[in-house]
Image: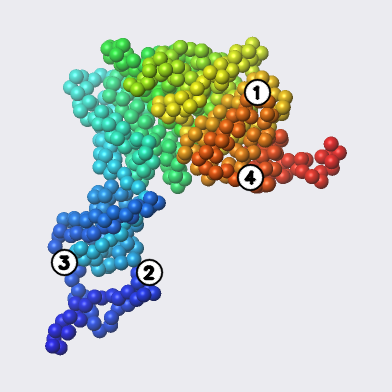
């Protein structure tokens, strides 16, 4: 009997959880009842090991129980996380593993936690990613990088035999790269997959490959696969640039010069060689190469559109004379696709949000280019099976007109440039034509369906609506521009994500105060009230704070919203505050 009790104590449970300490992972050793060295370790068990994994996804608070089986024994918690990443598509950096209420540390072995076959592990995570596709994409990019690096001299020579041409096609796998990018970056998965690629050093190989491709001028690129490869690299970079995580931002902001290089491959302003956006019209190799260059310029424009939304890069972009001329060249080239021209207009819209860029933009013949785009017939348009082609044409024209109107509104309200008298009547007619004829609900639907929405910070358009002008005595053009700025806010509050972002940024009070500072006789006042009605139909509105009411008044009458929202704004607008002798005299 004594031997049986001794044998039972020998293999007894090593730890006990008390009521007060169990959930904190604290354990008490039963002295004299167990010997650690004689307990069977997980590494001594069968190679096929199973765990019951409780998947807890936050903040959705969904719980799923799954069985995880591996034939390769994971020596450490870090190795276990890699196996779980492959099994459940949860990235390693997003995993929080716990067992028996204790969080598992990456550097520890599984034997340290006495894990055994059949134990339950809790996995807390926030998102899933397409691990297999992401790794496949990075593998393809590494192979392409190695090939371009080794064959750089022969590629630059322009002497490519049929055999070497086939080798290029078979090695670069551009179609596979394009397919992976399409699979990885739908809107609902773009952020998660971009973060995964960044955390696995995918940006390094992408930028290295882009730099090698830029070593050849467009005249020397004699193989179509290289141009298509550069286009796909730019599309991938743009998706990575759109990651908003601040702790990774420094990794994606240091290669703007390379983006300039791709954007300037074809000198549009001096030699508009871009061909119509229709691959079926041309069969010759030369025209196919020009069409591929068209795609390269488009990819670079997408990157610049994202970069111009970042204040850190705006001065660097606007002070580059070649880039600014190329922007205007994209607008003035008749055969350039219209939907791509919206990217250029989006860039100008972003740049105008920064008052420090205005003196540079006034040196560019921007207004003349805008008027040409507004009245030009579309050379290419997007069509959908469920939308009438004639309606597609109208909505596409309205979309381009919208971006033209937004840029003109910024130019007028911020006084970035002076409108020539000979163009004033044309500008006024253009603004009236758009604001009175556009079907707002249909237009918003098209912006989302055709992906024409330019995602920017909410503060700049609201700040524009608060331009410190005398709203009671505006000239006709200023009144129309103000109405266009408020229309921009209408589009913003029509989107659920933007409404919550507006609240998170602390701008809701200023949106509520906006109609108070616009004369009731203006159309902009009616639109401002509609903005609040649209917002209030989704989220209940509360009265603004007295502090923000005062700041909104200062913004509309004196200093603008950016200055009014500063904590020390009373120093710069002290002459408006009570007690100032000058104010009392006035």
Mark 3 residue crowding within 10 angstroms, few (<14) / some (14–19) / many (20+): few
Tell me the quarter of the image containing the N terminus. bottom left
Q: Secondary structure at mark 1?
A: helix
Residue beneath label 4, please?
544
Q: Residue at x 63, y 45 (%)?
A: 543
Q: Earlier in the sequence, mark 3 or mark 1?
A: 3
In the image: residue 456, left or right of residue 469? left
Q: Nearer the viewer, mark 4 or mark 3?
A: 4
Instruction: Please tell me which residue lies in front, 73 or 580.
Output: 580
Question: Cα distance, mark 3 to mark 1?
Answer: 80 Å
Q: Residue at x 30, y 49 (%)?
A: 90
Mark 1–mark 4 contact, CB under 8 Å? no
Mark 4–mark 3 contact, CB under 8 Å? no
Residue beneath label 1, please?
478
Mark 2–mark 1 contact, CB under 8 Å? no
Residue 293 occupies quadrant: top left
- Most extreme residue toward the right is 585
Question: Cα distance, mark 2 to mark 1?
Answer: 64 Å
Residue beneath label 2, please?
24
Q: Secondary structure at mark 4?
A: loop
Q: Earlier in the sequence, mark 4 or mark 2?
A: 2
Residue 44's tag is 3
Question: Cα distance, mark 4 to mark 2?
Answer: 44 Å
Q: Secondary structure at mark 2?
A: helix
Q: Residue at x 30, y 67 (%)?
A: 100
Question: Cα distance, mark 1 to mark 4?
Answer: 28 Å
Q: Residue at x 40, y 28 (%)?
A: 449
């Amino acid at each position: 009997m004594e031997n049986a009790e001794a044998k039972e104590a020998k293999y007894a449970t090593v730890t006990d959880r008390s009521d007060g300490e169990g959930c904190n992972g604290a354990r008490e050793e039963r002295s004299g009842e167990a010997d650690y060295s004689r307990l069977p370790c997980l590494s001594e068990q069968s190679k096929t090991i199973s765990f019951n994994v409780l998947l807890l996804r936050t903040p959705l608070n969904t719980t799923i129980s799954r069985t995880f089986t591996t034939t390769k024994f994971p020596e450490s918690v870090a190795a276990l996380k890699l196996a779980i990443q492959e099994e459940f598509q949860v990235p390693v950096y997003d995993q929080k593993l716990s067992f028996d209420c204790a969080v598992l540390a990456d550097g520890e072995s599984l034997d340290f936690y006495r894990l055994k076959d059949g134990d339950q592990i809790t996995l807390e995570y926030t998102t899933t990613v397409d691990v297999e596709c992401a790794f496949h994409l990075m593998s393809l990019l590494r192979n392409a990088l190695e090939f371009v690096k080794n064959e750089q001299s022969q590629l630059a020579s322009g002497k490519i035999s049929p055999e070497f041409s086939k080798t290029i096609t078979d090695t670069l796998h551009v179609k596979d790269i394009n397919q992976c990018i399409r699979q990885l970056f739908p809107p609902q998965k773009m952020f998660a997959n971009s973060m995964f690629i960044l955390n696995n050093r995918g940006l390094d190989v992408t930028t290295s490959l882009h730099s090698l491709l830029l070593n050849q001028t467009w005249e020397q690129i004699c193989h179509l696969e290289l141009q298509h490869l550069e286009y796909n690299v730019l599309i991938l970079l743009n998706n990575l640039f759109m990651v908003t995580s601040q702790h990774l931002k420094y990794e994606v902001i240091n290669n703007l010069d390379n983006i300039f290089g791709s954007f300037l491959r074809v000198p549009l302003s001096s030699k508009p060689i871009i061909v119509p956006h229709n691959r079926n019209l041309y069969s010759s190799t030369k025209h196919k190469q020009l069409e591929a260059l068209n795609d390269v310029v488009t990819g670079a424009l997408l990157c610049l559109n994202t970069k111009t939304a970042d204040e850190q890069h705006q001065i660097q972009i606007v002070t580059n004379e070649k880039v600014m001329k190329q922007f205007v060249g994209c607008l003035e080239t008749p055969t350039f696709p219209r939907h791509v021209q919206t990217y250029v207009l989006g860039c100008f819209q972003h740049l105008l949000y920064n008052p420090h860029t205005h003196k540079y933009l006034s040196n560019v013949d921007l207004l003349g280019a805008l008027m040409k785009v507004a009245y030009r017939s579309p050379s290419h348009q997007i069509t959908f099976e469920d939308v009438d082609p004639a309606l597609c044409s109208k909505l596409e024209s309205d979309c381009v007109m919208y971006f033209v109107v937004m840029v003109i509104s910024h130019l007028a309200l911020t006084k970035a440039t002076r409108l020539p008298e000979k163009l004033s009547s044309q500008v006024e007619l253009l603004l009236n034509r758009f604001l009175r004829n556009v079907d707002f609900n249909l237009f918003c639907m098209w912006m989302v369906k055709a992906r024409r929405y330019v995602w920017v910070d909410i503060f700049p358009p609201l700040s524009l609506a608060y331009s410190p002008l005398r709203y009671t005595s505006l000239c006709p053009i200023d009144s129309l521009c103000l109405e266009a700025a408020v229309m921009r806010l209408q589009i913003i509050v029509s989107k659920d994500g933007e409404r919550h972002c507006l609240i998170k940024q602390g701008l809701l009070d200023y949106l509520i105060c906006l109609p108070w500072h616009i004369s009731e006789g203006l159309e902009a006042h009616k639109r401002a009230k509609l903005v609040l009605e649209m917002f209030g139909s989704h989220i209940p509105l509360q009265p603004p704070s007295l502090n923000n009411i005062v700041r909104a008044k200062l913004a509309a009458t004196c200093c603008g919203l950016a200055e009014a929202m500063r904590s020390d704004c009373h120093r710069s607008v002290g002459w408006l505050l009570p007690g100032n002798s000058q104010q009392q005299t006035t």
